[in-house]
Image (tube, grey):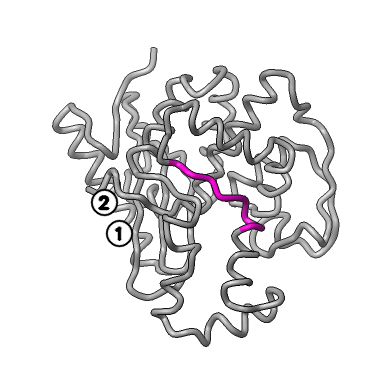
């Protein structure tokens, strides 16, 4: 359904970001052990280093780990500074993801929201945003695929297929991305729709009224299915347990239908490795 509709991808863009980092490491352009200091100026609030109260120091590869495992926005911004925004955009083109557009990193998104709401800082935004009518909230540029970081469900599953078949870069780079996606701590969306013996590696994305996840489900028989689910809610909350559960249910239904049909569709693919 809607495989070629433009959709905001939010933090799902971090798959491309970490893939580009891993490719540069494989090419010897970056040392994954290089130390990076995360200061108060880098913190955006949220998970991982983004929510720490004190400065800390860690390696580039640990920034990649936090970027994927807990969707750490500060880690993603610092990693993007190292690999380059234009390079990530070029990677999307190289992989044939012609409708995928990366506007910027998490800080760019935050600054866009502040400016649009007329807030000087995050504290003022926290006061102004809840007071906006829901209709005004829905018109924010960050929720519009014509202005925000966006792609299509078909291109996102294509990206996953390339990563899982070692066609998105050197095998070690693709393996690095697969490993980090398997360590994502959030299990309330795609993973909730599969039996315990199905291994799901995925990346979430969340914005007010937008709930999404893209990942690969691997069954015990070795068959893998790339799935992308994008949900829009009538209200503009960021936490909806019922929607998260629905994302898992439709992901399971999609995979089950493919396993029964032995074929492909726009949201999933199956293959056996080895």
Q: Is residue 13 left or right of residue 65?
A: left
Q: Is residue 198 among what the camera can see?
A: no
Residue 246 numbered tag: 1
Instruction: Inspect the magenta stretch and tell me whether residue 76 lies in it.
Output: no
- The CA distance from mark 1 to mark 2 is 6 Å
**Vertical relation: 114 (above or below) 158:** below
- The crowd level at tag 2 (other Cα within 10 Å; few <14, some 14-19, many 20+) is some
Depth check, front residue: 5 or 265:
5
Q: Is residue 9 left or right of residue 154?
A: right
- Helix, strand or loop status at disc 1: helix
Residue at position x 34%, y 41% in the image: 227
Residue 245 in percent (x, y) is at 34, 59
Does the magenta run of residues contain 107? yes
224, 237: nearer the viewer: 237
Relative vertical location of residue 76 with respect to residue 137 in this rendering, above or below: above
Asked if the residue under mark 2 is in contact with the one under mark 1, i.e. CB atoms within 8 Å, the reply is: yes
Quadrant in which residue 236 is drawn: bottom left
Chief secondary structure of the magenta portion: loop
Image: magenta residue range: 100-108
Q: Residue at x 34, y 29 (%)?
A: 224
Numbered badge on residue 48: none
Name the disc covering residue 250, or none. Answer: 2
Quarter of the image with the C terminus is top left
Q: Quadrant of residue 127?
A: bottom right
**Residue 216 in picture, x, y percent from top left:** 40, 36
Q: Residue furthest bottom?
A: 131
In the displayed structure image, the side of residue 181 where residue 153 appears, left or right? left
**Pick the front one: 23 or 137:** 137
């Amino acid at each position: 359904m809607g495989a070629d509709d433009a959709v905001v991808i939010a933090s799902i863009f971090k798959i491309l970001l970490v893939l580009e980092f891993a490719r540069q490491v494989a090419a010897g352009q970056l040392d994954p052990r290089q130390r990076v200091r995360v200061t108060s100026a880098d913190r955006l609030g949220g998970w991982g280093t983004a929510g720490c109260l004190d400065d800390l120091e860690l390696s580039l590869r640990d920034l990649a780990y936090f970027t994927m495992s807990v969707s750490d926005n500060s880690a993603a911004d610092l990693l993007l500074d190292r690999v380059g925004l234009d390079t990530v955009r070029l990677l999307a083109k190289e992989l044939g993801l012609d409708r995928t557009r990366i506007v910027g990193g998490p800080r760019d998104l935050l600054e866009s929201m502040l400016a649009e709401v007329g807030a000087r800082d995050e504290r003022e935004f926290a006061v102004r945003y809840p007071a906006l009518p829901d209709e005004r909230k829905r018109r924010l540029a960050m929720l519009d695929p014509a202005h925000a970081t966006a792609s299509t469900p078909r291109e996102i599953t294509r990206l996953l297929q390339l990563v899982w078949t070692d066609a998105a870069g050197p095998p070690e780079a693709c393996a690095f991305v697969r490993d980090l996606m398997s360590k994502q701590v959030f299990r309330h969306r795609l993973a909730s729709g599969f039996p315990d013996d199905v291994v799901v590696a995925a990346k979430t994305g969340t914005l007010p009224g937008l709930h999404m996840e893209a990942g690969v489900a691997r069954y015990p028989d070795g068959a893998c299915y790339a799935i992308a689910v994008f949900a829009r809610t009538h209200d503009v909350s960021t936490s909806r347990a019922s929607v998260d559960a629905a994302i898992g249910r439709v992901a399971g239904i999609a995979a089950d239908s493919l396993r029964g049909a032995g074929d492909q569709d726009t949201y999933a693919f199956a293959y056996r490795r080895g």
